[in-house]
């Protein structure tokens, strides 16, 4: 059917918006598909956008024309592409425009079948036409087309491929062994009482991964960019964190930190302080489109509840964890979430480290436990951070600096794997070096 002037303008503004702001492609990919454009050149241009992003290329008019200089005629010609690129006056209501495009496409699907229905008399044939039309309409809301054969081909390909290492290594060997590495599609939650070191642990793992050239993003609702990078620099360069954060550095140390920061920059390591979960998820998707993404760390869940549906904090956190698990699966990334532990955990007693803190101690939501593939509790004896208390306990013979129990060794942190859908549970021990914001394997 011949498109109306309104339809042409709508499609041009959608395409033009993508030329002007690459981040709009995140929302566009969620809502529309190339086939939904009425005009063939618009279909081709939109498909070209997706292909460029898949190659990690920035989209603007100059790059687009250069990348497709041999195919410009197929895409409408240089003059038309230039005209379309300038045809989006504003990004306001961009999502509404995408939804109108979908509605137009559905409407055309129905209209296109009307003449077929009028020509048929056989009831079964009429029903088949209607069912096929409904299937196409339902598929408009599906991100990927349904292909069952392809699903099984992917699985068997995975079964028969070489036994190469899968997932992302944290640099903490015992943890990688227990979890089977950090895998795509998983939501992994670290939880602890305040002051134990959950941010330090997450930042250490993020650093180890970034230096292995994995694509890593760190989202924090608690720490500023210079604080996150400061902890990383302290850990890697053996410079006291307090010296870095209080700016008591000599010129040589500043130069060393500058070189270290350049390494992280070259690996596209990104830190976000966005605390609106909806905006953060869009930022994550935009980062992935531009740079690729393996692992996202979110520190910590309670900081992201503003604007989330739910009457209670527990309900809001449940909504967030469900969104993050969905994000991990659909974007094929690993999501590492940090969560707070209740104060009542301080009263826990028992002979085993697994008695000190359990999944029941997670603050505000049982949904965190339900939605997480792997659940890791962190434990240290905070009292041992006080030099006076430490000396007193040492004099009483209550300390053991060779122990792998954090209640006896001030230089030990325990990770208790409370839940593991894909491997073993148990208690792990790592070396704690608080001065340098560092966690290491013993």
Image: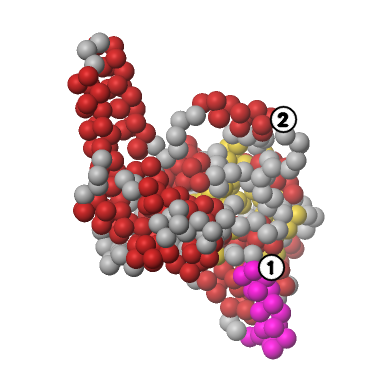
Q: In the structure shown, which secondary structural element does the residue marked by tag 2 occupy? A: helix
The picture places residue 431, in percent across and down from the top left corner, at 73, 57
Secondary structure that dominates the magenta span: helix
Q: Could you classify mark 1 by the number of other residues whose Cα lies within 10 Å: few (under 14), some (14-19), or many (20 or more)?
A: many
User: How many tags in the picture?
Assistant: 2
The residue under the point 72% across, 73% down is: 237
Return the residue nearer the eye: 280 or 25.
Answer: 25
Residue 219 position (above or below residue 321): below
Point out the image quarter for the C terminus.
bottom right
Residue 408 appears in the figure: no
Label ID, residue 235: 1
Going from N to C along the chain, the mark reached first, 2 or 1, is 2
Relative placement, left or right, of 411 versus 292 is: right
Relative placement, left or right, of 210 versus 120 is: right
Label ID, residue 329: none
Camera-side mark, 2 or 1: 2
Point out the image quarter for the N terminus.
top left
Which quadrant of the figure has residue 422? Answer: top right
The residue under the point 66% across, 31% down is: 157
The picture places residue 434, in percent across and down from the top left corner, at 66, 66
Query: What span is in magenta?
Result: 248-266
Residue 261 part of the magenta segment: yes
Q: Mark 2 points at which residue?
A: 160
Q: Residue furthest toward the bottom?
A: 251
């Amino acid at each position: 059917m011949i498109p109306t002037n309104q339809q042409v303008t709508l499609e041009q503004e959608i395409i033009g918006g993508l030329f002007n702001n690459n981040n709009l492609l995140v929302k566009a990919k969620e809502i529309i598909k190339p086939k939904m454009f009425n005009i063939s050149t618009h279909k081709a241009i939109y498909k070209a956008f997706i292909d460029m992003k898949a190659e990690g290329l920035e989209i603007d008019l100059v790059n687009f024309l250069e990348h497709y200089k041999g195919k410009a005629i197929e895409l409408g010609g240089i003059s038309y592409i230039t005209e379309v690129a300038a045809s989006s006056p504003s990004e306001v209501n961009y999502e509404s425009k995408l939804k109108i495009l979908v509605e137009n496409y559905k409407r055309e699907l129905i209209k296109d079948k009307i003449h077929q229905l009028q020509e048929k008399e056989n009831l079964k044939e009429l029903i088949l036409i209607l069912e096929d039309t409904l299937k196409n309409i339902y598929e408009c809301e599906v991100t990927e087309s349904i292909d069952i054969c392809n699903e099984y081909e992917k699985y068997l390909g995975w079964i028969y491929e070489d036994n190469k290492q899968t997932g992302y290594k944290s640099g903490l060997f015992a943890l990688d062994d227990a979890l089977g590495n950090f895998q795509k599609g998983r939501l992994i939650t670290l939880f602890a009482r305040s002051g134990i070191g959950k941010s330090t642990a997450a930042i250490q793992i993020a650093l180890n991964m970034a230096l292995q050239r994995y694509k890593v993003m760190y989202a924090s609702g608690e720490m500023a960019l210079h604080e996150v990078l400061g902890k990383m620099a302290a850990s890697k360069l053996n410079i006291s964190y307090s010296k870095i954060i209080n700016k008591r550095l000599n010129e040589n140390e500043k130069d060393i930190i500058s070189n270290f920061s350049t390494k992280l920059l070259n690996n596209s390591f990104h830190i976000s302080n966005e605390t609106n979960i909806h905006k953060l998820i869009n930022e994550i998707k935009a980062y992935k489109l531009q740079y690729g993404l393996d692992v996202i760390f979110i520190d910590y869940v309670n900081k992201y509840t503003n604007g989330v549906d739910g009457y209670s904090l527990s309900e809001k956190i449940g909504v967030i964890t469900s969104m993050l698990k969905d994000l991990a699966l659909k974007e094929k990334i690993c999501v590492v979430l940090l969560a707070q532990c209740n104060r009542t955990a301080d009263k826990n007693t028992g002979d085993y480290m697994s008695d000190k803190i359990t999944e029941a101690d997670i603050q505000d939501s049982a949904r965190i436990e339900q939605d997480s593939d792997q659940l890791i509790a962190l434990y240290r004896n905070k009292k041992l951070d006080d030099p006076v208390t430490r000396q007193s306990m040492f004099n009483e013979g209550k300390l053991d600096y060779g122990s792998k129990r954090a209640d006896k060794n001030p230089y030990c942190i325990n990770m208790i794997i409370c839940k593991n859908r894909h491997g073993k549970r148990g208690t792990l021990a790592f070396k704690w070096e608080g001065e340098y914001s560092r966690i290491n394997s013993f």
